[in-house]
Image (tube, rainbow, N blue to C red):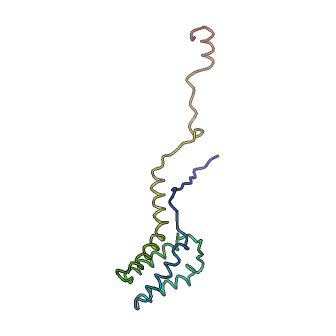
Amino acid sequence: MPGNNSAWDLPGVPASVTFDVISKDTTRLKAHVQKRGEEGEQLASELDELDELELLANVRSTTSVSGTFATDLDAWLVRALPVIEEGDSTADGQFDRISAAARLNTIYGHARDVLLARTPVFVHYSQIFTVRPRIHLANLAQHQATKRYR
């Protein structure tokens, strides 16, 4: 018997990005931030702490940027933004790509919630109550025998 489960997909839109897409940007942005004085060194050490907490240590190139990993990475980016030099288009581009990858899963989840809320409810025909027929077969046979219905 079919359940009340659903599966869906947005064609052409990835649910998340894998770490290999942003690994170089993450390394380069960390190095850029580290050069920006004491606050930058603090932020770089925070990213290292995330590594020690096995956030990045167990990350492989095929790891999806989602869940706790994406949340922690996005929180680090928010703290790192003021340290990034204004007008540095390279660092800005790295920040934007990492941020987009970290937030993609959340945006995809919100889109899923909106679409599921707007999905109409479908009722399987076997779950509808039994409808009593309007034609009584015995009466129909009797009427045909008396030639009332032809």
Residue that lies at the very extreme toward the bottom in this rendered image: 38
Residue found at the very far left of the displayed protein: 86
Which residue is most to the right? 1
Q: Residue 46: give x, y in percent of width and height.
A: 48, 85
Q: Position of residue 90 (x, y in %)?
A: 42, 79
Q: Is residue 33 above or below residue 140?
A: below
Q: Residue at 45% across / 76% down in the picture?
A: 94
Q: Between 8 and 21, which is closer to the camera in this rendering?
A: 21
Residue that extends furthest to the top in the rendered view of this protein? 146
Identify which residue, 108 or 126, lies in the foreground: 108
> Count of labels shown?
0
Q: Kindly indicate the quadrant of the structure image that contains residue 74.
A: bottom left
Residue at 40% x, 91% y is 37
Give the quarter of the image for residue 138. top right
Q: Is residue 33 above or below residue 134?
A: below
Residue at position x 47%, y 66% in the image:
104
In the rendered image, the vertical position of residue 90 relative to residue 121, given as above or below: below
| Left or right side of 92 for 53 | right
Look at 53% across and 56% down and name the residue there: 9
Q: Quadrant of the C terminus?
A: top right
Q: Position of residue 64 (x, y in %)?
A: 56, 69
Residue 105 location (% of width, % of height): 49, 66
Above or below 16: residue 3: above
